[in-house]
Image (tube, rainbow, N blue to C red):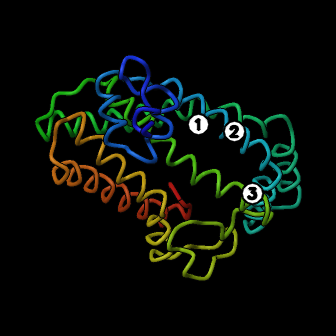
Amino acid sequence: MSTRHNNQNKNGEMGVIGRIIGIFTSPRETFQSIDKRPTWLVPFLIVVIVTMALSYFTLDVQIHDRQAIMRTKDLSQEQLDAIQSQMEGPFKYIGVLAVPIGVIIAWSVLAAVFLFCGNTIMGGDVNFKRMFSVVSWSGLIGLVGTTIIMLLALSKGTFNGVTTSLAVLLPTPELGAHKTILYRLLSKIDIFVIWELAVWIIGVSVIFKFSTKKAATMILSLWGIWVVISILLGSILNVSIGS
């Protein structure tokens, strides 16, 4: 029995398990199935549950890093004690509990941007549900990268220097230290980001009926704009946006 047959249900449609496997092994076939029957709940639940679990188990590491950053600021001991008390209180779980809302907002914004560019600028004709489905299922790729980063940080005891990007080629700045533009740029060139970009290109080409070249032009242009904006803002605010 072929893999393709195993990934399909009795009606010839790709089932849930088939889509989960297919987004990694055969994204074009998977998006063709999504184009016919768009869904988003399963990838949403997977991403939310895994992310919440990882966020919970790395809370102490996150708090440790934030406290280290705070100690680099010009703050009094009383201020540091107050901040530490807040970080270690009940409010530390807010980030974990906010994951579902954060995922929905992030995916909705991303889908809206893709939809606007695809329909208004590139001349496509796709509804929000189909675009949101593409973004949702593609999120499983990013989840793999997030899981690896979280597990490495848990093992190392800090998120500082933990990366799957080309920033690993440069010395890691100390927590709270200024990051150079080159470091910020290399931090955007991440193996899982590139993988997800490739999957988005395939998804956009399938649902908009664009050529791969046209879809790549749209996705890579948007990514390039994001990289420039995030590097500029990061340099101004001395924070790492989206890395």
Q: Is residue 117 above or below residue 62?
A: above
Give me the C-alpha separation between circle 1 and circle 3: 24 Å
Q: Nearer the viewer, mark 3 or mark 2?
A: 2
Q: Is residue 41 above or below residue 152?
A: above
**What amino acid type is highlighted by mark number 2?**
Gly
Density class for disc 3 (Cα within 10 Å; few <14, some 14-19, many ≥20) is some
How far from the left and from the top, in percent, is residue 65?
A: 76, 60
Residue beneath the point at 55% across and 65% down: 238
How far from the left and from the top, in percent, is residue 1?
A: 45, 36
Residue at numbered disc 3: 66
Density class for disc 1 (Cα within 10 Å; few <14, some 14-19, many ≥20) is many
Give me the C-alpha separation between circle 3 and circle 2: 13 Å
* Side of 27 where 80 appears, left or right: right
- Element type where label 1 sits in the image: helix
Disc sitting over residue 211 in the figure: none
- Spot the residue most to the front: 1
* Side of 220 where 146 appears, left or right: right
- Element type where label 3 sits in the image: helix
**What amino acid type is highlighted by mark number 3?**
Arg
Q: Please tell me which of labels 3 and 2 falls first in the chain.
A: 3
Q: Is residue 71 above or below residue 29?
A: below
Residue at numbered disc 2: 95
Residue at numbered disc 1: 47
Q: Nearer the viewer, mark 2 or mark 1?
A: 1
How far from the left and from the top, in percent, is residue 198?
A: 35, 53
Q: Please tell me which of labels 2 and 1 falls first in the chain.
A: 1
**What amino acid type is highlighted by mark number 1?**
Val
How far from the left and from the top, in percent, is residue 9?
A: 44, 22
Give me the C-alpha separation between circle 2 and circle 1: 15 Å
- Element type where label 2 sits in the image: helix
Density class for disc 2 (Cα within 10 Å; few <14, some 14-19, many ≥20) is few
